[in-house]
Image (cartoon, coloured by chain):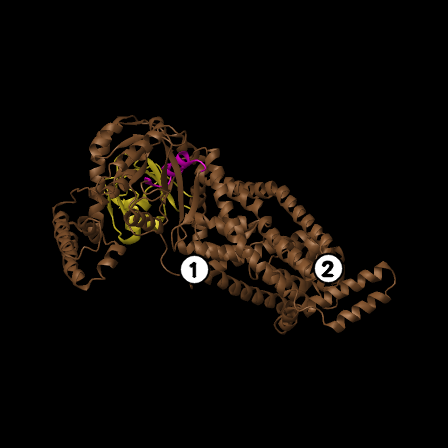
Chain colours: A brown, B yellow
Amino acid sequence: MSQSQVTVALAGNPNAGKTSLFNALTGARQHVGNYPGVTVDKKEGEARLDGEPINIVDLPGTYSLTAYSLEEVVARNYVIGQRPDVVVDVVDASNLERNLYLAVQLMELGVPLVIGLNMVDVAEQRGMKIDPDKLSELLGVPVVPTVARTGQGVQELLRAAVDLARQKPDWRPLDISYGADLDQAIAELAGILEGSTPRHGLISARWLALKCLEGDHEVLESMRQDQNLASRLEPVRQRVGEHLKSTLDDDPESVIADYRYGFLSAITRQALVLEREVRMDFSDKVDRVLTNRLIGPLFLLGVLYGVYQFVFWASKAPVAWLETFFGWLGGAVEATLPEGLLRSLIVSGVIDGVGGVLGFVPLIMFMFLAIAVMEDSGYMARMAYLMDRVLRVFGLHGNSVISLIVGGGISGGCAVPAVMATRTLKDPQARLATILVVPFMNCGAKLPVYSLLISAFFAHRQADVMFALTIISWTLALLAARLLRSSLLKGRQSPFVMELPPYRTPTLKGLLIHTWERTWEYVKRAGTILLAVSLVVWALMSFPGLSEQDEARFASLAAQAQGEEDQKEIANQKASAELGGTVAGRLGRALTVLTDPLGFDWRTNVALVGGLAAKEVIVSTMGTAYSLGQGAKKGADAEPLAKRLQDSPGWTPLSAFALLVFVMIYSPCIATLVTIRRETGTWRWPLFSMVHNTLIAYLMALLVYQGGRALGLG
Amino acid sequence: MSVVTLRELKPGQTAVVVKVTTGGELGRRLRDMGLVPGTPLKVIGRAPLKDPVEIKLRGYNLTLRNNEADHIMVEVEQGA
């Protein structure tokens, strides 16, 4: 990248078409990263103007430049710290006043600004025509009309931005009047700041003064580093605050906002050359139906069910292909390499591990496609609107519902995309609570365990038991959320206040880009850690091997064996003994101290330990532990195992039910834990999730088993 | 002319914001979304359990919870 390459930062309100513009500018030449220390996506890309590369940075969508939300802090710090050559503010022309509120704040900061007056087509449909030249003249910055979805005006906008950047203009903060009282206070504060050490860099003293009066946490914090400075600023702040309170019964913050909006209304009134009343626009008509008291919830249920069906239907074939492929690969390696540790490492460790990562990919891809459709169409916000009242009781947010369903709320989802889907939640506490309760849902990997145990012990009441499990998982998830929100995740509720964007038809390009970048992120980030952890679990279940004595014993047994059946039986017994001797096996035996009261034997314990890697492993491990060989792998052929469990003396319907409950609740699989780590930015939450869920699982299974026995059921 | 809170408005009613009686994060957020004195708004509807409420202002739709609407004092327009 050459020194002189121009950097253009895109700012704008959510739903103003910023992402469309970014996509139109950069096409496929974009990548997603992270701002240091936070989980806000940083999207960068490259545009071309006359063959020359232009660096484009997509800032998070914000309504303002205060320091309240993470997105706003990130956007502001980028503009101040990195000083892009020019900022393009994407403004929704059909919603001009509110969108320009951000533009005014960028102008107050003084950054070289170009306004992309986007969605002029929508504005015209809604009866508004804006004169871009007039608007430019009034604001004092270039204004270029665009329709980013179709690409109209995008090159002109880029040219205007690059032209401005090439002039290398100084930062010229906009001075608007906030009324006599505040103007005077700002001048006074700015005077003090200007006299102080110039360590606030190139930021204007006036802007800092304004932020002081607005009570901006970040700016105040940095001022307080300097005791001397703070002691001179504070009295002015207090004085003007008290003065406004007594004269206007208001605070500086809201007076400043009022003046900003006043400034803007005057401008928009002049720039609006045509405005006719449109009786009721399309979006409001759709809303009449989709948020109707009766139709709304039914439609929502239909959408959720449809999404769920679509995702699992569409990913079924690709998941099967991947499974077949990895099965074939494992088989091929098995056939080429001699039996031994290396073969086991490659087949059970690496191939199964990578298979475990990639096996999720189609599921995640279609899930993100479905989420992108809901987001881009505007329905996601309606979902939050409809569900908020119900979920709020449990300390969750309207948008939590999507994650709970994807996680297996109807049964058969997956917690990995569910945890990733919580990104649409703006309330950080509610988001964390959602992440932590999603694993209670009945994901697809738990189903083989359910079907094994249900067919063995509840053959006549399959549907009833499945339904009971679904009810239990929802009840527990909601109660756990409530509990978390009133203990660990206490604290203030973030405002719900949310825009309901107009309904739009999503563009194919936008959907594909969204889906691709999120899917790729999963593969890249989860993949490496997941593989490493799979190897650890493999090692736990492989070492140490049988002692020489036992090897010799099985060898002699095999030599004596008559016929194929006996041979197979001995091989299976050997596998069982091998597993029993490993770290995991010993752990399983040691754990019986704890699990006896739940009715689990050591074999079940080993399977549960293996289930940490992936819940699918439970059935196959039980198969090995019960000396059935790998025949029961992946639940493909669980019948002999079900038969064997029925015949085992330790097993009763009650202990089976306790195990069902335990499997439903206990520690999320590694893929989920890694995803939680990724989404929360710390290992604290996945660790918490592991311990917390296992503890609840233990208590619930204990309750079921001991309670059942007390009632004479076992 | 009567001043009430936004919570008390019925769907279809129009009103003008008189005052926002909260500061902090919520106050800031409401202002960022354009709810400042003098802003006309219209109640579009309410979610099935009567909460949150959907309003239209400055040409766009906004939803907020009833306990947030409590902080917005509005003057109901005559005849609406």
Pick out the residue farthest to the right.
Answer: A562
Mark pair 2, 1: CA separation: 52 Å
State which region is magenta. A5-28
User: Does the segment drawn in magenta span residue A21?
Assistant: yes
**Residue A354, x across and y down, in percent:** 60, 52
Task: State whether residue A455 is above or below residue A320.
Answer: below
**Residue A668, x across and y down, in percent:** 55, 59
Task: State whether residue A574 is above or below residue A112.
Answer: below
SS label for mark 2:
loop
The chain that hosts pointer 2 is A
Local crowd at mark 1 within 10 Å, few (<14), some, or many (≥20)?
many
Q: Which amino acid does label 2 sit on?
A: Glu
Which residue carries the number 1 mark?
Answer: A485
Please name whichever residue, A243 or A147, is drawn nearer the observer in this view of the structure: A147
Q: Residue A339 carries which label?
A: 2
Mark in the foreground, 2 or 1? 2
Q: Which image quarter holds the C terminus of chain A?
A: bottom right
SS label for mark 1:
helix
